[in-house]
Image (spheres, grey):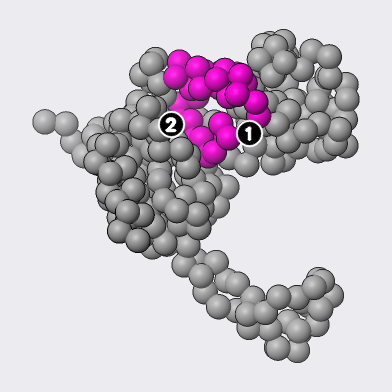
Amino acid sequence: MADNKTQDTEYAIEVNDVSMVFNMASENLSNLKEYFIKLMKHELFFKEFRALKHISFKLPKGSVVGLVGTNGSGKSTLLKIIAGVLEPTEGTCVVRGNVAPLIELGAGFDRELTARENIYLNGALLGYTHEFINSKFNEIVKFAELEDFLDMPLKNYSSGMVARIAFAIATCTEPDILIVDEALSVGDVFFRQKCEERIQHFIDDGNVTVLFVSHSMEQVALLCHDAIWIEKGEQRMMGPVDEVLEAYQSQFKKK
């Protein structure tokens, strides 16, 4: 029988009793000066907002899991913890392998720089070396369809074009873990199809663990084998995707 340590390595992601608490100011302030004045005078109070409450699950390597829940349920917060952007207030999150986070596509770009410069900048933020980006540069440009716009400042790009660059960079190599947060909702229908085909290629390969968030239940049902339902920061259900989606959607039928 394999020991516990060996069994643990079979999981790409382990979320163990994770909670996330944000301190929110009790009043809205119009500027930073007003904020610090009230803070120094001890006139500013904070209240706790518990975005996640004791979330626990384990995802085996190669699994494809949808994360569903209404707006503000804590899905994006959880994805940022798994991606290493946020540190949980309580609990632990263990991630085994390199992560391609398709979260808030375009975050970390410098809009004053050109698309060419941002490819290298964003690649560095994802941990890619300059030499690696050199080897993948033409592939990134071709996938994002940027051949005629490489030396244009990013501030002149549409949000859809920025998302194209970010998606192409993050998926230019096969990751161990792919995190997709509404990344397919930006851009035209033809480019979304290209993105779906690339994600499907990773899924078909069987080596990539995919955590997928979308408001399209059709997309979740099509791509995912299992699903996790989080509502108001609480984990409601985890299991086969059809069962979880049926339970999730039934809450709307009751209203």
Q: Which is nearer the N-term, disc 2 or disc 1? A: 1
Taking the image as shown, residue 211 lies to the left or right of residue 169, namely left
| 203 to 215, vertically: above or below | above
The residue positioned 37% from the left and 27% from the top of the image is 222
The residue positioned 57% from the left and 17% from the top of the image is 194
The residue positioned 72% from the left and 15% from the top of the image is 145
Tag 2: amino acid: Gln
The residue positioned 51% from the left and 49% from the top of the image is 76
| 33 to 134, vertically: above or below | below
Picture coordinates of residue 61 (x, y %)? Answer: 34, 29
The residue beneath circle 1 is 186
| 144 to 37, vertically: above or below | above
Picture coordinates of residue 166 (x, y %)? Answer: 67, 29
The stretch drawn in magenta includes residue 132: no
Picture coordinates of residue 62 (x, y %)? Answer: 35, 26
> Cα distance, mark 2 to mark 1?
14 Å
Image quarter where the N terminus lies is top left
Tag 1: amino acid: Val
Picture coordinates of residue 241 (x, y %)? Answer: 29, 36
Per the rendering, the mark at residue 80 is none
The residue beneath circle 2 is 219
Mark 2 is surrounded, within 10 Å at the Cα level, by few (under 14), some (14 to 19) or many (20 or more) other residues, namely some
The stretch drawn in magenta includes residue 199: yes
